[in-house]
Image (tube, grey):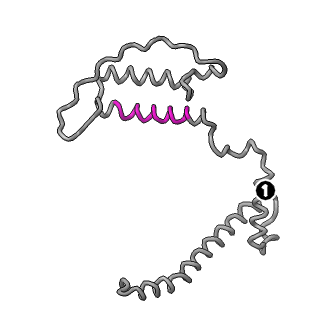
Amino acid sequence: MGLPRRAGDAAELRKSLKPLLEKRRRARINESLKQLKGLILPLLGRESSRYSKLEKADILEMTVRFLQDQPASSCPRAAPTPPDSYREGYRACLERLTRVLPACRVLEPAVSARLLEHLRRRAAGATPDGGSAGDFCGPPSPSPPPAPMPSPPAPPCRPGLWRPW
């Protein structure tokens, strides 16, 4: 079957494919309901042979009731709280830096090691507001002034590649 040559051919093609696509969609739904039935009946302590002819709505209702009856502690939280999310993101970033920083050789190895060690210490007590994990009430304690950072190495002579350091 070739590409449609006219606008009418495209419409005819869509019209002829629609029943086929609908048939596939229904087959997927039915297969998923069959799998759901096979999963939910044993969890409810019921024999599959006794419930061979369940309606689709019954399978869905049984599943919903089963999930609602589950204790809240066994269900994972929908999303981490913002401080947890911040810590997870910080740690993920640190893991990526640990792999990438030595490989790209942008910094001297000693500077790279110092930077990663500093970030690891911060990760141990990092919070979104910059305080440590134990500071939940009151303003954050003043931190000592940061040590002066060494000047960044001279950029490599590569035309066309801009880097901020």
Coordinates of residue 96 in the picture (x, y in percent): 42, 36
Of residues 115 and 54, the one nearer the viewer is 115
Q: Give the magenta part as a residue range.
A: 86-101
Any part of residue 124 in sight: no
Total count of labels: 1
Residue drawn where x is 63% and y is 43% of the image: 79
Residue drawn where x is 56% and y is 23% of the image: 125
Relative height, residue 62 to residue 100 (above, below): below
Q: Amino acid type of disc 1? A: Phe
Where disc 1 sits, the SS reads helix
Coordinates of residue 14 in the picture (x, y in percent): 48, 82
Quarter of the image with the C terminus in it: top left
Relative height, residue 105 to residue 31 (above, below): above
Q: In the figure, is residue 146 to the left or right of 143? A: left
Quarter of the image with the N terminus in it: bottom left
Among all residues in the image, which is located at the extreme front? 139
